[in-house]
Amino acid sequence: MTGMRGIWLGCVTLIALAGCEFGKPAKKVEPDSFTDTVGYEMKTIHDRAKDCGTRPDSTCTTATINYPLFKGQDALNDTLQSRLINLYVNGDEKPDSSLSAMVATYLTKYDEFKKDDERKDMFFELTEYAKVVSQDSALVAIEYGGYTYQGGAHGSSFTGFLNWDPKTKKALYLEDVLQPNTQKQLNKIGERIFRKNENLKDTASLEQDYFFEDAKFVLNENYLFTPVGIKFLYNEYEIKPYAAGQTELVIPWAELKTLLKPTSVVAHYLIKNAGI
């Protein structure tokens, strides 16, 4: 009897740990406050110049914009579309009121340009986009950018980022996630990673090959909060010649452990990356 009781208790213990031989019970999934997402649908605006005729898009002037339209997030939609509208606006120009109006203005500029340009094989191009890189209930991380050519020696590309809090319906910035007076520390960490990526010694000058003011490294204001860290991106001409293209660096959350506000919207990334 004692032996049977021991076997029974042993099986109960195994059931609790591994389901004994009767199959594993379904695990209880704890609710995760960071799994909810903001719904959206992708929209496309596409138009062609009047002189395109039957030619394919690849050989005539076109304008194309692909972007997400978020449900119940008017402020986010307005902010994102404003950034797309202003992407290639010159300092003395007045921005258009909508993406559709921007496309119309772009094609009108081409028509005016062609009046004085006799090159038959010359055409403009405008391509803009926005996409959700990652999101949860606390943060929507968006990348946007584009490419434009308007008759010059070469075209121009740009990549930008938008970090958005869907609860407060406001854009998020470094000061929202970092503790006060930590910018210098952040910049120091960024420079160490930059020099490693560029194969530069700690004492190597930044004067000859880079465009940093006074040859001093500085993180820019173009960054994205990602699950692995803060991604900074320098666009063409920003710190290097056009031919060098863009420069990207990522500061892992582990490097920012002592700099982050413990209750910020990115605090859970630090926990996940720490394997907790």
Image (cartoon, rainbow, N blue to C red):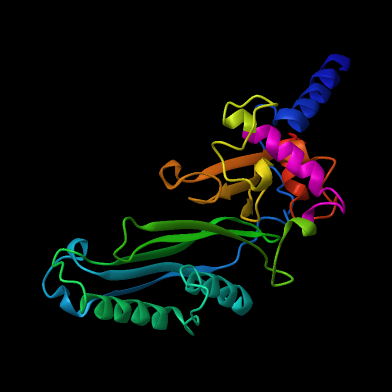
Residue lying at the far left in this picture: please name it.
54
Which span of residues is magenta-colored? 177-194
Q: Residue at x 84, y 14 (%)?
A: 3
Residue 201's x, y, as percent?
A: 65, 24
Q: Is residue 272 above or below residue 15?
A: below
| Left or right for 196, reference 91 | right
State yes or no: residue 226 in magenta. no
Quadrant for the N terminus in the image:
top right
| Left or right for 75, reference 96 | right
Q: Main secondary structure of the magenta part?
A: helix
| Left or right for 175, reference 40 | right
Residue 150's x, y, as percent?
A: 32, 66
Q: Please name whichever residue, 181 or 30, is drawn nearer the observer in this view of the structure.
A: 181
Q: Is residue 133 above or below residue 272?
A: below
Residue 15's x, y, as percent?
A: 74, 30
Q: Residue at x 45, y 41 (%)?
A: 244
| Left or right for 111, reference 270 | left
Quadrant for the C terminus in the image:
top right
